[in-house]
Image: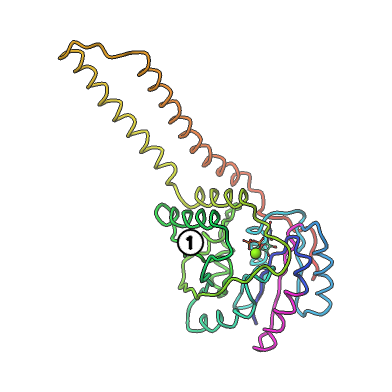
Amino acid sequence: MLGVVVPFFNEEENVGAFFRRLTAVASDHQFKLDIVAVDDGSTDGTLDQLLEAKTWVPNLRILQFSRNFGKEAAMSAGLDHVRGERVVVIDADLQHPPEVIPELLDKLSEGHDVVYAHRRSRQGDGAIRSLFSRSFYRLLEVFGEVALPADAGDFRVMNRDVVEALKSLPEKQRFMKGLYAWVGFDQVGIPFDVAERHAGKTKFSFFKLFGYGWNALISFSAAPLRISSMLGLAVAFAAGVYGLFTIAEAIVFQRTPPGYATIASAILFLGGVQLVAIGVLGEYVSRIVGEAKGRPAYIIGRVYD
Ligand code: UDP
Ligand code: MG
């Protein structure tokens, strides 16, 4: 049996096509499915479509969130509820072709614990989006707590042990790609071609993605803190050197240093550096506050079992 976790947010035009493709693959390869579809607070006809699909798709459970909690929460909910010794996480918009699942499973049965699909190319992404995304992975690679495989999304199959490990992580602000990597185990990737979105458009605006990346960096790296300490040290050192230099100038050359402009720029510069450092600190404090509240990552309004 194969567990399937799939998040839906305003995907009404994709529901039918998704389940047709998925069930066709399952019957071709003769595996039984246990599907958890998470309706992440859709405001269109997604739920109706899911209920319609439920009439003909076996073993389909629908978790309806009480509002939109985001894809990370939706995947977490799916993983919390899915059954099966092996589990696949897949997007609802058919950008992750269900036909790739058997390949992932074959690789898994070679003895790995996780097989993720990584995209062959970023064609179709805008230049700016792929530039940001590449620099993001690079930043995490250099400064992060975990190395994320570049170009791997959430499309992956994993063993039950890995699912249980993910479920045991108590954090509420969940950056799944980081958590997947953090739990370890034997992970390999296989390349696949990302398909065009079947219908509708992406739910991630540039700003949402930027926020996502920033959150990931704060969650999985203390580098911004370290960089601001380094910057502080560097500024203090430079100021010390400059101070000695002006004293020497006054004694040796009897030249009084020009006052007003240097003082003003030094104060402004230091003020700026301090504000940045406080801001960085604040980012981490706001994380702590978020976790300390202990609110759940998602709330399920209704279950259609
Ligand atoms: N999604 C979700 N909640 C959200 C945004 C997206 O459950 O708040 C789902 C969406 O329905 C889809 C998957 O996450 O199944 C990937 O979203 P999308 O295709 O918009 O992202 P992209 O492929 O552009 O990165
Ligand atoms: Mg997509």
Whether the magenta-drawn stretch holds residue 29 is answered as yes
Residue 84 occupies quadrant: bottom right
Some atom of ligand 1 lies within 8 Å of the CB belonging to the residue at label 1: no
Is 213 left or right of 20, judged from the image as shown?
Answer: left
Element marked by disc 1: helix
**Image quadrant occupied by the N terminus:** bottom right
Is 11 left or right of 184, judged from the image as shown?
Answer: right
User: How many numbered discs, if any?
Assistant: 1
**Image quadrant occupied by the C terminus:** bottom right
Q: Residue at x 76, y 53 (%)?
A: 67
Front-lying residue, 277 or 293: 277
Location of residue 257 with respect to 305 vertically, above or below: above
Front-lying residue, 3 or 249: 249
Location of residue 61 with respect to 176 vertically, above or below: below
Location of residue 172 with respect to 76 vertically, above or below: above
Q: Residue at x 31, y 14 (%)?
A: 258
Residue 140 occupies quadrant: bottom left
Name the residue type under label 1.
Trp
Is 114 left or right of 54, judged from the image as shown?
Answer: left
Residue 54 percent coordinates (x, y) = 81, 74
- On the image, numbered disc 1 is attached to which residue? 182
Residue 145 occupies quadrant: bottom left
Quadrant of picture, ligand 1 = bottom right
Q: Residue at x 40, y 42 (%)?
A: 226
Residue 18 percent coordinates (x, y) = 72, 74
Q: Residue at x 67, y 52 (%)?
A: 296
Q: How is the image coloured?
A: rainbow
Residue 157 percent coordinates (x, y) = 57, 74
Whether the magenta-drawn stretch holds residue 226 is answered as no
The span picked out in magenta is 17-41
Q: Residues within 10 Å of mark 1 (few under 14, many from 20)?
A: some
Residue 58 percent coordinates (x, y) = 77, 80
